[in-house]
Amino acid sequence: MTNHATGLPPKGDKRRVRQSPNRAAYDQASLYKVLDAANIGHVAFVHEGWPQSIPTAIARLDEHLYLHGSRSSRLYMALSAGERVCVSVCLVDGLVKARSAFHCSMNYRSAVVFGSGQAVEGDEKITLLDRFTEHLIPGTSDDFRPMLPKEIKATALIRIPLDEASAKIRDGDPVDDNEDLELTYWAGVIPLTTSAGTPVASANLPPTVEPKAQLLKAMANF
């Protein structure tokens, strides 16, 4: 099992991983790798006295995490108002089968980001929305009509700084009790992967319009 713990935050810091702390990573590079591999984050906040957790598209661009959606939604109204939020992501890389069901686990990469949102406006918003879309669907940055003013106005783009965040990573084999190692039950890792399939054209797309080469190349490496 790899020990990922570096730069341990002080006791009481909300970033500090308490369960299996040897799997924690607090360095920027580890955090960025997890966030860059994710397209969906779960945003937790309190709305009218009730806890909420809403999955939404995310993108790490430079030193911030970005979220976008309808300006009129409760999530983006809360984010635009600067409410404190917690964004979590998790990518499962494998099922870990041990000799004991008690020691079964998963190999995963996860991250938790704490902070308050800031609305992005103006020309910066348009540029970042283009980069956001390229993160979600690589190879498509020059394959869209220009955004309409009403679309830009109706869309909220929120950024959250990444100075209060941590990652947690598990990899490797199951960890069985020493007395179980001689038992003949199979133990190991069942890998789980996500990959892009062949693009399927919309039913109303003329047959002469084909996906661009950069999209096909990006999907092959997805």
Image: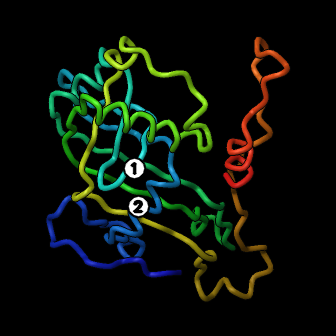
**Residue 141 percent coordinates (x, y):** 55, 38
Q: Nearer the viewer, residue 41 or 217?
A: 217
Name the amino acid type tagged 2: Tyr
Position of 5 with respect to 176 (left or right) is left
**Residue neighbourhood size for the residue with mark 2, other residues' Cα within 10 Å, grouped as few (<14), some (14–19), many (≥20):** many
Extreme-right residue of the structure: 207
Q: Is residue 13 above or below residue 118?
A: below
Instruction: Determine the residue positioned at 31% across, 70% down.
Output: 26
Position of 113 with respect to 193 (left or right) is left
Q: Nearer the viewer, residue 78 or 220?
A: 220
For the residues labelled 2 and 1, say whether their Cβ atoms are less than 8 Å apart: yes
Instruction: Determine the residue positioned at 26% across, 45% down.
Output: 160
Instruction: Determine the residue positioned at 41% across, 65% down.
Output: 168
**Residue 198 percent coordinates (x, y):** 80, 39
Q: Secondary structure at mark 1?
A: strand
Q: Quadrant of residue 193?
A: bottom right
Q: Quadrant of residue 142?
A: top right
Q: Nearer the viewer, residue 189 or 83?
A: 83
Q: Which residue is denoted by mark 1 in the rendering? A: 60
Position of 138 with respect to 62 (left or right) is right
**Residue 72 percent coordinates (x, y):** 30, 14
Name the amino acid type tagged 1: Arg
Instruction: Determine the residue positioned at 48% across, 52% down.
Output: 90
Q: Which residue is denoted by mark 2 in the rendering? A: 32
Q: Is residue 29 above or below residue 133?
A: below
Q: CA distance from mark 2 to mark 1?
A: 7 Å
Q: Secondary structure at mark 2?
A: helix
Q: Nearer the viewer, residue 155 or 74?
A: 155
Residue 2, numbered circle: none
**Residue 146 percent coordinates (x, y):** 48, 22
